[in-house]
Amino acid sequence: MPELPEVETTRRGILPHIKGKKVSRVLVRQKQLRWPIPLSLSKELPTQRILAVQRRGKYLLIESENGNLLIHLGMSGSLRILKKQIPPAKHDHLDILFDDNSLLRYTDPRRFGCILWQHDSFESHPLIKSMGPEPLEDGFNGGHLYKQSRGRKAPIKTFIMDGKIVVGVGNIYANESLFMAGISPKRAAGKISLLRYEELACCIKKILATAIEVGGTTLKDFTNSEGEPGYFKQALQVYGRGGKQCKGCKQELTEIRLGQRSTVYCKNCQK
């Protein structure tokens, strides 16, 4: 699944190609995604100019003069900028065409993503309004994690993946951040000190910022807006490396399941 760095990479990739452009047409080939694509999108978005492309957690927010698009890439979704109309492939479900003949194409083999349209602000949408702070903004820090964790028995990995606590820390980056901070993913969230939470918050910021800088992680179904994969996978310390040597202490990495998700950690380096 594309995580926050992949979504931010996509946002930065498509922004200069669509901001300020006027939409000429919207072609919906498959409306049945996670939720049906609203019929009003094809009628109301054409003739409107794109004002901004933002991100909230793993959601892309495309603002136009008349309304707002909320896009989630799901398990396998991607957005591409095409300079001209190219015949669609099997899983190319939607095109937004612009007045210069370029287009933004949404592809999603598994159809777990969503494309929603509304006139109200993004902040009012039910999928957005209950979200926690962005991990790369000032509102997210160790003090926030410490305060929210008091009395919590859930494992720390599950805790930091809760979008109401902090948005966008998905499975890959939770594994990596906990390894960098030296914290066992099984440790109860409510048993971790403020000092360790301050270190963990810094590690989350570092891991995500680095992943964004190099274009995200190379996932099976993800490539960036220009069709090239990200390369953060080369820097992964634990994720996907269960049974291999820890790059720090050389002991074997342990792989378990936490909250239905694969979790890899070093019993020696993470306490």
Image: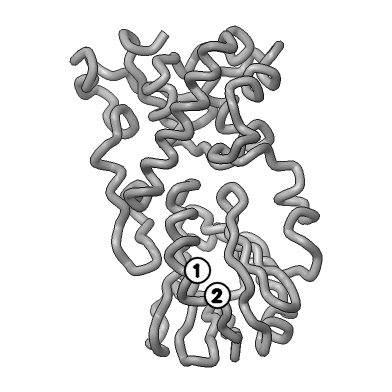
- State the residue lying farthest toward the front: 138
Q: Which residue is mark 1?
A: 15
Q: What residue appears at the point 56 percent right and 26 percent down from the top-left corner?
A: 158
The image quadrant that residue 141 belongs to is: top right
- 67 vs 57, left or right, is right
Q: What residue appears at the point 28 percent right and 49 percent down from the top-left corner?
A: 231
- Give the SS element for disc 2: loop
Cα distance in 3D space between marks 1 and 2: 6 Å
Mark 2 packing: few (<14 Cα in 10 Å), some, or many (20+)? some
Q: Which residue is mark 2?
A: 19
Between 212 and 78, the one lying in front of the other is: 212
**Residue type at the position of mark 1:** Leu
Q: What residue appears at the point 59 percent right and 12 percent down from the top-left corner?
A: 194
Mark 1 packing: few (<14 Cα in 10 Å), some, or many (20+)? some
Percent x, y of residue 133: 65, 38
Whether 140 is drawn above or below 45: the answer is: above
Q: Quadrant of the C terminus?
A: top left
Between 162 and 9, the one lying in front of the other is: 9
**Residue type at the position of mark 2:** Lys
Q: Which mark is residue 153?
A: none
Q: What residue appears at the point 68 percent right and 35 percent down from the top-left corner?
A: 164
The image quadrant that residue 163 belongs to is: top right
- Residue 109 visible, this orientation: no
Percent x, y of residue 124: 80, 55
- Residue 79 visible, this orientation: yes
Between 147 and 158, the one lying in front of the other is: 147
Whether 252 is drawn above or below 6: the answer is: above
- Give the SS element for disc 1: helix
Percent x, y of residue 93: 51, 75
Between 217 and 180, the one lying in front of the other is: 180
Whether tag 1 and tag 2 are in contact, CB under 8 A, the answer is yes
